[in-house]
Image: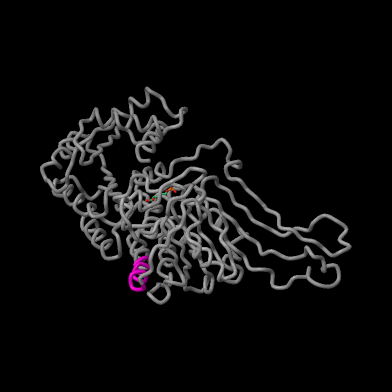
Amino acid sequence: MLFPSLYNLFSDGLLPESFSILASGRTAMDDGAFRKSIEKSLKDYLPADRWDAERIAAFMDMVSYCAVDVSAKESVQCLSDRMKGGNGGPVAVYLSTPPSLFGPTAQALADAGLIDDHTRIAMEKPIGTDLASSKVVNDAIGALFDEENIFRVDHYLGKETVQNLLALRFGNMLFEPLWNANAIEHVQITVAETVGLEGRVSYYDGVGALRDMVQNHMLQILSIIAMEAPARLDSTAVRDEKVKVLRSLRKMDADSVGANSVRGQYAPGAVKGEIVTGYADELGKPSNTETFVALKAHIDNWRWAGVPFYLRTGKRLPSRQSEILIQFKPVPHSIFGKGAKGNGAGSRLEANTLIIRLQPEENIRLSIMAKEPGLDREGVKLQEVDLDVSLVKAFDGQRRRIAYERLLLDLLEGDTTLFVRRDEVEAQWQWIDSVVGGWKDSGQKAQSYAAGNWGPSSAIALIERDGASWHD
Ligand code: BG6
């Protein structure tokens, strides 16, 4: 995602002049070998109309590579030499490493004199594996960088559709007066994937869906859905509002976690007609790591008192689909009931539903009740119809950017609005730790589900107990 995004920005003339990209990893390789590997990946990834041999060659001229092992101080020398030979302009460091390496890497760069007051640092999630370890990372990075120069990446915040939530909520008068416990019955957030481990076993096992997806992406979506209106679209105002929501999440414990969460792990099955193996087979040993999680969350504040937020994410589910469903309450009194002209069999009123589809295609659908055409001698008949807006069609012909394009540009311009602040990360971990602690203390295990299904059957029961059902 990073190199295609950088290439797209370069190709559109959006990178600063005399820009250079110094890549590094543990594998020993020279510039030529690294460029070749990137070129190959770009070829596989980029749509044919974005591939331009001349531009690719110019882009590759910017790229160089150093093999670095941060535990061996002398290997940082390569970075020093390259950077000192550079143009002396501002530097942004982008770390896409395990969280345990964030602090040591930043320290190694500082020891080599490669960091100054203007250096920015970006870190790919996860920031730690729990609250305590995230504090260690944040302290180590905070000792070297001011918060305004720290960019904690959650790539969902770079997605057009996630930002569209702000437009929908705060760019329209229509929804906000109803956006609370008076009118909303419940909220569902689903991020479903069809993929399995994708060769990421060593990262994923022991981490699981709760930490991999809920701690970051899903809680960010939840906080944008549930926050108060920020006064401005700037990094302080927006993040202040999000963190208030995250801090209002009701913690779980051994007593409450069973009724409010389901863990699942995929067993062999079929996804989109293709036979796939189970998680334990891919891993090569049994494991209690969850590849699916469903949660019933509560936000304990005035706006959301009594409104459950059902969250669900998993791998090897039937389809790739991310969406938010807002279930409104039924009208307080139906005039289409018994008596007069309202006694028809088809006069049942369905409560309004707003579905915001984030992936794969963007659309916003509001179900409303409408009268069926007819003379209504048997009573007025109502039927649910959809107000359906396809954002793909509405903005036909406009290129959809990779989430990282925006985030990288914001990093280069120093705008932290779409990055996660320290207090947000810590509030996210506090809630996640309460769930993990509840699982541990109560011994709650991952239940198996056949790949290609919507998780274990208890995930269906989680919501149906409350008289609602998942939107699949
Ligand atoms: C990553 C997770 O953060 O997000 C992956 O680590 C997951 O497990 C991915 O597959 C999903 O991102 P997207 O953009 O494909 O929805």
Q: Is residue 202 above or below residue 186?
A: above
SS majority, magenta: helix
Q: Is residue 80 above or below residue 217?
A: above
Q: Percent position (x, y) of residue 351?
A: 66, 64
- Is 22 colored magenta in this rendering? no
- Of 116 and 442, nearer the camera is 442
Residue lying at the far left of the rendered structure: 74
Q: Which quarter shows the N terminus?
A: top left
Q: Name the residue rendered at 46%, 51% in the picture.
A: 451
Q: Percent position (x, y) of residue 446?
A: 39, 62
In this orientation, does residue 231 appear? no
Magenta part of the chain: 432-442
In this orientation, does residue 36 appear? yes
Q: Is residue 201 above or below residue 137?
A: above
Question: Residue 168 is drawn in which quadrant?
Answer: bottom right
Judged left or right of residue 257, residue 169 is right
Question: Residue 31 is drawn in which quadrant?
Answer: top left
Q: Name the residue rendered at 24%, 29% in the picture.
A: 33
How many discs mark residues in the rendered view?
Answer: 0
- Is 439 colored magenta in this rendering? yes
Q: Percent position (x, y) of residue 68?
A: 18, 41
Q: Percent position (x, y) of residue 37?
A: 30, 31
- Of 464 and 448, nearer the camera is 448
Residue lying at the far top of the rendered structure: 54
